[in-house]
Amino acid sequence: MAGKKKSRPLLAGLVVIGLVATSGYLTLELRKQEEQGVTEVRNVGVLSGAGKQSGKPADASGDRWSRLESPARSVLRGADGQVRAVLTDGARTAKLTGPARTFAEPASTASKVSTTDWVRLMPEPWTKGAEKQKWFKDWYAEYAGSEEDDLFAFAFQYVAGAPQRKDGQGVLYAGDANFGPLNTAGAEGGDLRLEQSDFYDYLGTPYPFRDGSVGTPEAVRARSLDCSGYVRMVLGYRARYPLMSSDKTGDGLPRTANGMARSGEGVDVLPLTGVAAGNRPTAIDQLQPGDLVFFKLDARTGQRLDHVGMVLGHDTEGHLIFVSSREEVNGPTIGDVGGVSRLDGNGYYAKTLRSAKRL
């Protein structure tokens, strides 16, 4: 009996050593995954995919180009006939085919979008025949097959549960975002949460616009992004699309959903014909991942469009899903709180869709 009692501390010690060694191994593996860009955060956001490889596919000798209309665009197919890229005249966003990924937000919806689409920003708007130009050849050689973060990866770095990320200066540039601060005026003020939180409010640091004005963050709006502020964070601050300081000054993407929808930026895939219920677009099959979609939700805003999101793709049930920052969920979501995130059918957002643009 005494011998057995003495062996227990020894056994316990061996177990502790084993656990420490295992913990050290897992820590090293997690660090390796972070360095390689693997993103798997408690089943939030990207569930699969994510490295940093890039480079043109090894065998591109069978590539062929074709043209399609409505909207005018160039399509690149490989020797196997599969689409490798879709590039729309007048737009800088390119839809490339890459490794499969799954996007999910289990806390708010059962929808999952599994896709091989990667949406990236080209250095110049596409024009017919640009495949022969050096700028495109260089850009495509860098990003064809790349798993470096694209617009969708950026977008899901702000949903509920997304981990915080800081740049070299210690500025928090990604992580779970709010929609905006609570409206202290209560029911008399109309909305539960205040709008007007732009990307620089989230960052908590002043942002100099190209027109000379400076966006000054408000402390109460720290880590908050309203619907248009979220789009400006993803496309502007992260992907470097030019940004206007307001709807009226500067050049690039305007400040509000209404300004974006009515601007001359990009290509109107679903042209705005009016904000009344009878102006709901029907040809949503023309939409593709990465397109901005605009809605008329609030009668109080008159003729203004008051919500914007980005098309993500079809979920596993075949519904066309979009992501946006919303008051009801208090931040970016593809969830069902306050209305399912479907553009097809007769749900809340499907009925209030009014136009779409491809930047």
Image: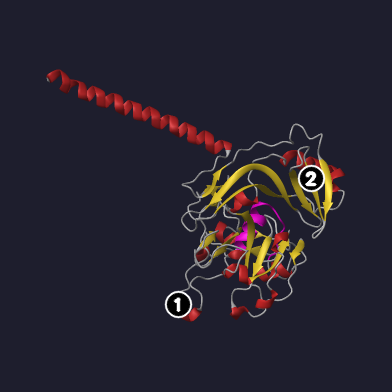
The local secondary structure at tag 1 comes to helix
Determine the image quadrant of residue 241: bottom right
Q: Identify residue for label 2.
A: 76
Start-end of magenta stretch = 229-245
Residue at position x 62%, y 71% from top?
A: 351
Q: Quadrant of the C terminus?
A: bottom right
Q: Quadrant of the N terminus?
A: top left
Query: Is 313 placed left or right of 20 in the picture?
Result: right
Classed neighbour count for the residue bearing mark 2: other residues with Cα under 10 Å, few (<14), some (14–19), many (≥20): some
Three-letter residue code for mark 2: Leu
Classed neighbour count for the residue bearing mark 1: other residues with Cα under 10 Å, few (<14), some (14–19), many (≥20): few
Query: Is 42 placed left or right of 239 in the picture?
Result: left
Name the N-terminal-most of marks 1 and 2.
2
- Residue 230 lies in the magenta stretch: yes
Snapshot colouring? secondary structure
Three-letter residue code for mark 1: Gly
- Residue 2 lies in the magenta stretch: no
Position of residue 292 measured from the top left corner of the image (x, y, whole percent): 68, 61
**From this viewpoint, is residue 256 visible?**
no
**From this viewpoint, is residue 150 visible?**
yes
Position of 24 relative to 336 (above/below): above
